[in-house]
Image (cartoon, helix red, strand yellow):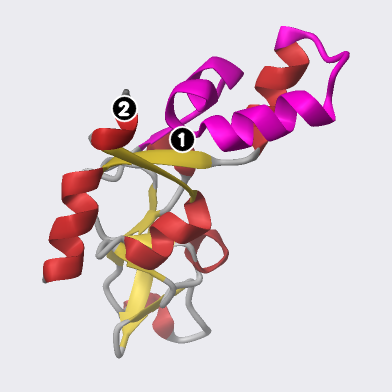
Amino acid sequence: MNEEKYIAMDIDSLALECPYFTGLTDANNGYGCKHPEQEEFEELYEEDGYTYRGFEGDESKSKTRQGKCYSFSCPIAFKCSTIEELKEYDPDTADAIISNNPNASELELDLKADAYDIMVVKKELINKWKEE
């Protein structure tokens, strides 16, 4: 089973573990990503390590690329978007969704699974981050 190679966690837990996550930004309500392969970004001003949208008089300053931390575009993990994926990577959450929605269709269960923002990341990455 995949629990040997992968860890499932919600997006907030992943953000706490991920060395690329930054909360020092105005982008995406403080969910920033410093990974060079993050495709979701905006150009912001930077001062003392904090990226921001700007104030009057900032127009002459250069901007920097600030990635945004989203479950759908994460370059180091993937999102469990269906109940079947949750059954494979996070069976406890899948069982809870199913038992709390006994008459739900497969589509309804998929929508509920998607809303949890459960991310799957390789266990070796988490262990590597903890060692650094």
| Left/right of residue 34 with respect to residue 44 in the rendered view | left
Question: What are the residue bounds of the magenta stretch?
Answer: 78-106
Magenta region includes residue 31 = no
Q: Secondary structure at mark 2?
A: helix
Residue nearest the viewer, comparing 6 with 59: 6
Queried whether the magenta region covers residue 80, the answer comes back as yes
What type is the residue that disc 1 sits on? Answer: Phe
Q: Is residue 94 above or below residue 34?
A: above
Query: Does residue 36 appear in the picture of this structure?
Result: no
Q: Position of residue 43 (x, y in %)?
A: 36, 60
The quadrant in which residue 23 appears is: bottom left
42 left or right of 48 in image:
right
**Labels in figure, total:** 2
Q: Can residue 101 be seen here?
A: yes
Which numbered circle lies on residue 72? 1
Nearer the observer, 25 or 84: 84
- What residue did someone put label 2 on? 2
Front-lying residue, 2 or 9: 2
Q: Residue at x 62, y 29 (%)?
A: 94
The span from disc 1 to disc 2 (Cα, nearest Å) is: 21 Å
The residue furthest bottom is 48
Outermost residue, right direction? 103
Callout 2 environment at 10 Å: few (<14), some (14 to 19), or many (20+)? few
Percent across and percent down for residue 82 are 57, 20
State whether the magenta stretch is mostly helix, strand or loop: helix
Q: Nearer the viewer, mark 1 or mark 2?
A: 2
Q: Residues within 10 Å of mark 1 (few under 14, many from 20)?
A: some
Q: Image quadrant of residue 130?
A: bottom left
Q: Quarter of the image holding residue 120?
A: top left
